[in-house]
Image (tube, rainbow, N blue to C red):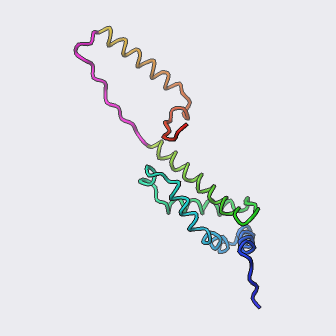
Amino acid sequence: MKTVMEPSSREQALVSRAQSGDRKAFEELLEGHRCSLEKYARMRIGSHLRAKVEVEDVLQETCARAFQSIGHFHWKNEKSFLVWIKGIAEHVILKLAERHQRDQVLYVEEETISPEASPSRVLRRGERFDRLQAALDGLRPDHKEVSSSPV
C-alpha cells in the first residue's frame, strides 16, 4: 500500500534529506517552488538591472547559495522554505545591483570658461571646485553612491 504524504510533510521530508546532502531531494524541493521564485525574481529585478542581468542567472546563483546553506535552514511551517529562498534571491539581486551600479561611469564634460570671465572669477570658481572635490573625497564610500530609491 502506498502512503500519500501531506504536501507540507513531504516538503519537510525533502528538506531533511537535502540537509543530509541529498542533491536530488534539494532539486525536487526547488522544482516545487521554481515558478514562485521566478515570478519573485522578475518582480524584484528593476528594468535598469534587467537590461544587464538575466533572471535565469539570478535563479542559478540563488539555488547554488541555497544548496550551500541548506544546513542552516530551520523548518517552521509549509511557507518557511519559500520565504527563506526568496530572502536568498533578494540578497543575490541586491548584490548584482550594487555591482552593476559600481561599474557605471559618469562622464562630465570639462567646464568651458566664458571669454568674459575675469581672471579673479576663474580663480574663485576653481577654488570652489577644489573645496567641493575635497569634500567629496572625504565622504565614506557608501555615501558617495547615488541611489535611485526614495529615502
Task: List x then y, in percent, for residue 11.
Answer: 71, 71
55 on left or right of 76? left
Please identify the dominant SS of the magenta region. Answer: loop
Residue name at image x 73 percent, y 58 percent:
72
Task: List x then y, in percent, for residue 137.
Answer: 50, 26
Where, by quadrant of the figure, is residue 104 drawn? top left
Task: List x then y, in percent, for residue 17.
Answer: 73, 72
Location of residue 22 with respect to 39 vertically, above or below? below
12 on left or right of 137? right
Magenta region: 104-118
Residue name at image x 43 percent, y 49 percent:
48
**Residue 107 within the magenta-colored segment of the rendering:** yes
Location of residue 33 with respect to 125 vertically, above or below? below
**Residue 48 within the magenta-colored segment of the rendering:** no
Location of residue 147 with respect to 85 vertically, above or below? above
Task: List x then y, in percent, for residue 131.
Answer: 45, 18
Where, by quadrant of the figure, is residue 141 drawn? top right
* Near-viewer residue (20 or 129): 129
Which corner quadrant holds the C terminus? top right
Where, by quadrant of the figure, is residue 63 drawn? bottom right
